[in-house]
Amino acid sequence: MSRPNFVDNSGLSGRADRAARALPRAAARLASAAQGLAAPLVLLAGWDIGARLGWLPEQILPPPTEVLGALRETLQDGSLLSSTLTSLRRVAQGFFAGAVAGLAFGFAIGASPGTRALLTPLFLSLSHVPTLGWIPILILFVGIDESLKILVIGWAAFVPVALNAAQGVRDVPRAYLELGRVLSFSRWSRFQSIVLPSAVPSIFTGLREGLANSWQTLVAVELIASFEGLGYLMAYGRQLFQLELVLAAMIVIAVIGLTIHVLLGLIESHLQRWNPR
Amino acid sequence: MTASALSITTRAAEGSAIASNALRRWESRLRPLLVPAALLTLWEVCARSGLADPRFLPTLEAVAKRGMREFAQGGLAADIAASLERDLLGFAAGGFVGVCLGLSLGFSRPLERALSPLLLAHRQIALFAWVPLISMWFGGGEGGKVAFIALAAFQPALINTWQGIAGIPAAYRELARALAFNGWDFAVVVALPGALPRIFAGVHAALIYSWTSTIGAELLLDIAPGVGGRMNEGQHLFRIDLLFLCVIILGVVGVAFNLVAGVLERRWLSRSQA
Amino acid sequence: MKMLHLAVLAAGLAMASPASAETLIRIGYPGTGLDDRPFAYGDYIAVAHVQKLVEAEFADQPDIKVTWTFFRGAGPALNESLAAGQLDFAAGLGDLPSIVGRSRGLDTKFLASAGEHDALYLAVPPNSSIATIDDLKGHKVAQFRGTNLQIATDRVLEAHRLTEKDIRFVSLDSNAATAALVSGAVEASFGGAEYLDLAKRGVIKIIYSTKNDDPTLGRNAGLFVTGEFEKAHPDYTAKVVHAFIKAARFASDEANRSAVFEIWAKSGLPVESFAADFAAERLAHRITPVIDAFIVNRYKDQAQRAKAYGLVKKDVDIDSWFEPKYLQQALADLKLEHFWPTYDVNGKVVTSGDVEQTKAASN
């Protein structure tokens, strides 16, 4: 019998007994995981059975096997991959442009009360117009090419990034700024070493919201006017009454959304470890 | 200096201080208007002088004239009313279901455990990805549009209500347990008032999302009276003045919603916390 | 959770629908006029609508109301409405969307033809370098997907040894496509008679038309009723068909040529467009409700091609789709059994019709 490496009240010790204690814990974890999976599995089963038994007419909800078939087909002929890449590229370009512009603008109005007073009213009134509302005007100005998508997606990112960056800069504690002045930091190093680190949580919130906005706007723009991309794939499925294609595209969109969500969560927790506050 | 000379100088100094204060107040009130005014002047100059193609940049007068014509004869007021009707209907339906479900999830741990993965997956699907599905299930008419708007309102209402209830500090729950509150009392006395700010934030967000999705629904689903329908018309017939007019209307409604929501929030929250 | 949401919505919508003693006869048309006006053109459905012939059939039954819905989204949007149970009749639904709907289990019955040999036009900006179908390769072209424009286009492309993959198609409804073409957002557009007026004014030019090509390349449309409505109200179905056949009689008579064009002009397109669309073509060439070997074969052919082009996933049974008894009853009642000619599978006349004797007023 192995040496006990701790003392406990139950009088048990040893590997076998540790295993006996671990079992209820593992079972509990398994049980809660099962609870989490229960609802989706029940829905999935209900969907499959309903389709098979004919309760669900196929124009309302095609059976899961058909959706999988649509996924397989579009993967095989390459249209799923190229659509996904096109959509991702658009989001990346639009978000990058909008975020960079948004950060610059946000810092400007956050740091200078004068600039803030000048530009904020205009900016706020423009930001109250739903992003989609700009599309018809933009279509007349720039057509339905990539520039339309980049502009709209960029604007969708610009607004939250700018607002949150401005807030982050404004919220820098005065004490820190005073300290920087006392230590005669140059404006630039004051910005770099004091303002920026303190504003990082707000900036990150803005970037996160901006990315979510960009993704949402991408899908909408591709539905309205496009000839490639995931939104186009869905619109095509809708026109030809191929619900399974629509669902397949939605699944891909959900997966991408989930991936972005998880990645951002990881980056956020990493950043929080670095931020003293 | 003599006393009277001193008092005169003091009063003169006071006077000039008051004057410069007044000047400063006027300046700060006018400053927000500076940039928009400058831009509008620039716009008007470009449009009138022919620097900008009149097809792309109508004069402000043209937009105003268009507005007056559309309101008087074009039934623009009816279009706005139609859009608002859809918006508020969808907002009410989706917001109500969202708040109810959020409350259930907040109060019931088993329900939360069962449904949260599904809801997480649902959150990842971009809102507009639902349009083709909804139009196939409900058609592209009023039913489909309202269903879509309700879906848009549902999301923020649900999340914020749920987090609001779930975020009640453990200390409060302990206290309620210690005081032998039953579930109902806990809910009414502790949880709901505590979660109210969060719930209001969710309803506020739902209002904004509903308006955005109303425009999107009108642009993507069947033609019907509404601001989105007018924007389609403006786009297809190259009526830029109509488009600018619609954008202004969208902005005004957005601002109005924000203002109303903010005022209501402040009044109800302050009353509940008094 | 999705189900719960759906259930609540469904309950709400169900409660919202009026529980009246009124019977609604809901007719849908896959298209709108200029600026999305609720008017049709190019077929006898438009004539029935403007002359209120269907409403007249039920004039003595005040608890029956006829509603018309015009779908900007054309056939696909109409299909969605059918699937959602919001329509009873699909009047003038194009061949591709009706075949697609049937392949997805939509229960409809083909009551009569609503149009055949409808022309397809290819329009480009006036200074475009695109001159033939072959030049379209790699260019951005507007085409309303899922409508009978698509299958007609696919057949034309096939005849020129091209496929959809060679062209970047943008799906735009007819108003949006016109705007996109005029503003240069797309380089070409496939469409119908709506382009003729623009071509006349020099805003665009038409470089191809199926009028001068293989006659089976034209587009077709049909009059459909939902299986549910037909089973519940065969008498109403008969009356509706009766009204439409009356309209067809009026619209295919050459003597009414200018009157018909005037009716179609309510859609916002000028009379000259229709004159140009029907140049050197008799009205009855397109406007005929009969179900003959030609039409049956056309639909079978389109269904096979749709499957070949990947537009539908399975074989569609065409033969059991037709329900000609209402048509035949109406023809007998109106004494029009010999009014329209019937054609064989190749388009050759089998029996001639009286309509061929009609003459235009000023000729």
Image (cartoon, rainbow, N blue to C red):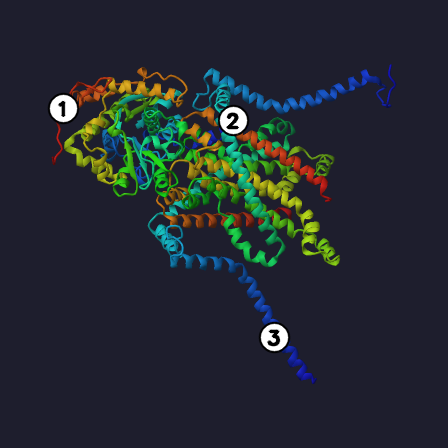
Q: CA distance from mark 3 to mark 2?
A: 73 Å
Residue A106 location, x and y as percent?
59, 50
Q: Chain of mark 3?
A: B
Give the camera-side residue of A92 and A59: A92
Residue C107 is drawn in which quadrant? top left
Element on which disc 2 rests: helix
Q: CA distance from mark 3 to mark 1?
A: 102 Å
Element on which disc 1 rests: helix
| Residue B164 can be seen in this image | yes
Label 2 belongs to which residue?
C3
Mark 3 or 2, which is nearer the eye?
3
Q: Is residue A239 positioned above or below C177 on the image?
A: above
Element on which disc 3 rests: helix
The kind of residue on which mark 2 rests is Met
Label 3 belongs to which residue?
B15
Q: Which mark is residue B174?
A: none
Q: Is residue A230 positioned above or below C319 on the image?
A: below
Mark 2 or 1, which is nearer the eye?
1
Residue A249 location, x and y as percent?
50, 28
Q: Residues within 10 Å of mark 2 (few under 14, many from 20)?
A: few
Label 1 belongs to which residue?
C354
Q: Chain of mark 2?
A: C
Give the camera-side residue of A170 and A236: A236
